[in-house]
Amino acid sequence: MVDIYILDLLIIGLLLLVVTLGSGWITRLPLSFALIYLLVGMFLGSEGLEMIQLRENNVFNAKVLERLTEFVVIISVFSCGLKIIHPMRLRVWNITARLIGFLMPFSILGLAIVGRLFLGMNWGEGILLGAILAPTDPVLASEVQLTDTNDKDELRFGLTSEGGLNDALAFPFVYFGIYAIQDNNWHNWLKDWLIIDLIWAIAAAIVMGFLVAKVIVLVDEKIQKKRVVDESMEDFIAISAILITYSLTETINGYGFLAVFVAGLIIQDSYRDPHKPMAQLEFIERLEKLLEVGTILLLGSILLWQPMLNYASQSVIVIVFLFLVIRPVGAWLSTIGQRPLHSHRRSFHPATRLLFGWFGIRGVGSLYYLAYAFSHGLKGEVSEQISWITYTTIVASVVVHGISATPLMNWYEHQVATKISVPHITVNELEDNSEN
């Protein structure tokens, strides 16, 4: 009898071949690659052929999911950083500051209120649910992010920078929720949370991401002046930068996700040869797509119909509020008075603001935070409740956002973006304008 592992490899190989050769057709359809991976994962998983298993004796192995999603997220946030040109031009970050500084806390609080009023959760459980589901996903949102470093579209820039940052900056709220569940007397831990988990961890991540990236670029350029490295090995500099930055930052209790995003920004801006970070970006994006396959396959494989049905009504409440109320309202409020950099308009086009609200894609980041909460004390009935609501919300996002991303972005680019951009202005003039 053929080993299950060998059959898994065969099916995954066939899947990769089919989606690769069929990508020309798939990209023209209102269909995402993630949706295909999800369906195949369900077919191979616990409710299908049982060829992929993350459960042993009916016990879910959260640590495997945590480590896999952790690696996928650090690869993806680094990719987001590499896509952003001239990160030191502070004016371009105005929209990002609004999305991170207002929209994300607004989403966490909104979900916490929903959990409190409709799901029977206490405030700690509601905040943890909000922190898990509030971050948008940098892995599954590639269709709505910057396409390359010459892309000046502010909708894509905002979604890219938001995806790169909020998967890191949701961490303090995850800790807050875990602490509140373990000890409902906030006075016992709130001061430590503010000093260590909020101020120190964020500051340490920013400093470490900057320093490690600068050192790696300096060492790389110095050595290659004396002897050029093997061309086939050069792309591994990007992987080394990710792993070194992440591990050193986590060692000093900083947020590794944030540090890796900062490192991507600094590496993009620091090389004298602009082709170097571009080559790294191309390599990282290919790796990211491969890791996406494995992660979404695993998500599909762990889904179980009965518990999803048990929590279906609660999941629907969360999905409706998150997709149709909390995110859209928060995005609309966040963009009030925001003036586009590359347009004569005094504010964002209404369609742009609506799309900011719609493309709050949930995915691998939420899976990571859920698995992290499991390994840090989340258990019992509330763990079942939060986990199945999270899984169902991610599945809903993969379906509805996956189906709508291509047609909506095509419509936006043809009907909105081309009409609001400044005519007859060169890229250099745009960059000069963004400095002023």
Image (cartoon, helix red, strand yellow):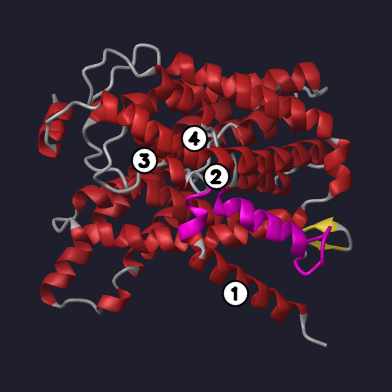
- The local crowd at label 3, few if under 14, some if 14 to 19, many if 20 or more residues have their Cα within 10 Å, is many
Q: Which region of the structure is painted magenta? A: 24-52
- SS for dot 4: helix
Q: Quadrant of the N terminus?
A: bottom right
Between the C-alphas of marks 4 and 1, the distance is: 36 Å
- Work out whether 316 lies above or below 213: above
Image location (x, y in percent) of residue 8: 70, 74
Image location (x, y in percent) of residue 220: 22, 65
Residue type pointed to by label 1: Gly
Q: Nearer the viewer, residue 77 or 343?
A: 343
Between the C-alphas of marks 3 and 2, the distance is: 38 Å
Image location (x, y in percent) of residue 129: 69, 32
- Mark 4 / mark 1, whichever is N-terminal: 1
Question: Residue 361 sits in which quadrant?
Answer: top right
- Mark 2 / mark 1, whichever is N-terminal: 1
Query: Which mark's residue is nearer the viewer, 2 or 4?
Result: 2
- The local crowd at label 2, few if under 14, some if 14 to 19, many if 20 or more residues have their Cα within 10 Å, is some
Q: Which residue is mark 1?
A: 13
In this image, 138 relative to 220: left or right? right
Q: Which residue is mark 4?
A: 169
Q: Which residue is mark 2?
A: 30
- Work out whether 272 lies above or below 111: below
Marker count (numbered) = 4
- Residue 95: numbered disc: none
Between the C-alphas of marks 4 and 3, the distance is: 11 Å
Question: Residue 207 sits in which quadrant?
Answer: top left
- Mark 2 / mark 4, whichever is N-terminal: 2
